[in-house]
Amino acid sequence: MIDPLNSKQNLEAIELLYRGYRSFTAQADRLLEKRGLNRAHHRILYFVGRNRDGSVADLLEALAISKQALNTPLRQLLSMELVESKRASHDARIKMLRLTPSGKRLEARLTDAQSELLNTVFEEAGPNAEDSWHTVMRILSDT
Amino acid sequence: MIDPLNSKQNLEAIELLYRGYRSFTAQADRLLEKRGLNRAHHRILYFVGRNRDGSVADLLEALAISKQALNTPLRQLLSMELVESKRASHDARIKMLRLTPSGKRLEARLTDAQSELLNTVFEEAGPNAEDSWHTVMRILSDT
DNA sequence: TTTAATGGGTCAATCATATTGACACAATAA
DNA sequence: TTATTGTGTCAATATGATTGACCCATTAAA
């Protein structure tokens, strides 16, 4: 009777997840570092990019950090004009956040780098592998 | 002509990698937190576990952090008797590090949690998916 | 055998990022 | 008018990381 726990396969999978994730985030990290930005900024760019005109509160909830922790990187992105805010017309308390053109360009560059990497990987692995990989990751994500 | 860059597939893959990785590390993080440990400790336990009797310098190289950054968590693991060190017989300057029995138990518990999660995931995804996933992740890791 | 290099450890100063708590201000809702 | 909401900021504190300067003991080289 074989205990499937800690099989060679699983031990390799653990290793692969660590290494794969690192390899996946490495390019973006380098691109960000050039501008003095980090993953916190990236997360903001990402969520603002995918949630146009969302409020600061929305962003706080998405990032699950404190108001004070958000303050610094968000202010930097605003002053670098990568993100802009305007008051909501129906409620002037609310600031709606969106990417500026250059913010969009940066976000796109970060996403493109990762997207290109994935293209290379899936091309090398073959089309069936891509579907299976998605299936596995979807299950893992929702667990 | 379709630009495969930033296809829906790829955008989903990026999202899945983030979410999947978070889900993958969540259990271990919780287990560690209970003992007042964090990912730094986990990394040390991991590398010491897989590199029995390695030196401090080996560990430093593997973790790619400064001597001073290693100092605190390693000292904690030593004082908690999860890691032990003994001088090398051929060179008394070198400290060889290894897990104690309870260090091994903790490391195994962390690994088991991840391994179990992967078992569940792969079981649900089917056997072919597992192989494909490994293929993709191997390529990604080595890129 | 004196001297230099190596492995390991620590102190100090500093930086970055995060936290909680306490407020302040303007705008909206009750 | 008063209370609540959305946003922003100050202060104190905690953690984890950095670089730089050393120290000790041991081993290697001169």
Image (tube, coloured by chain):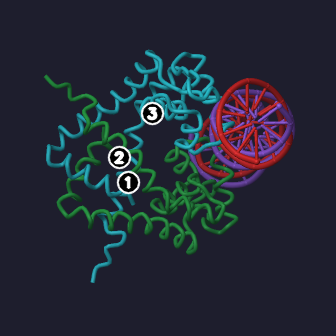
Chain colours: A green, B cyan, C purple, D red
Mark 2 lies on residue: A16
Labels 3 and 1: the sequence-earlier one: 3
Question: Which of the image's four quarters has the N terminus of chain A?
Answer: top left
Let me know if marks 1 and 2 both belong to one chain. no
Element class at badge 1: helix
Mark 1: few, some, or many residues within 10 Å (few <14, many ≥20)? some
* Residue B23 position by quadrant: top left
B33 vs A102, nearest the viewer: B33
Tell me if I can see residue A68 in this picture: no
Where residue D14 sits in the image (x, y, percent)?
70, 28
Let me know if marks 3 and 1 both belong to one chain. yes
Numbered circle sitting on residue B141: 1
Q: Is residue B133 above or below residue A110?
A: above
Residue A106 located left or right of residue C19:
left
Q: For the point 58% across and 20% down, which residue is it?
A: B78
Q: For the point 51% across and 32% down, which residue is it?
A: B54
Viewer-nearest of labels 2 and 3?
A: 3
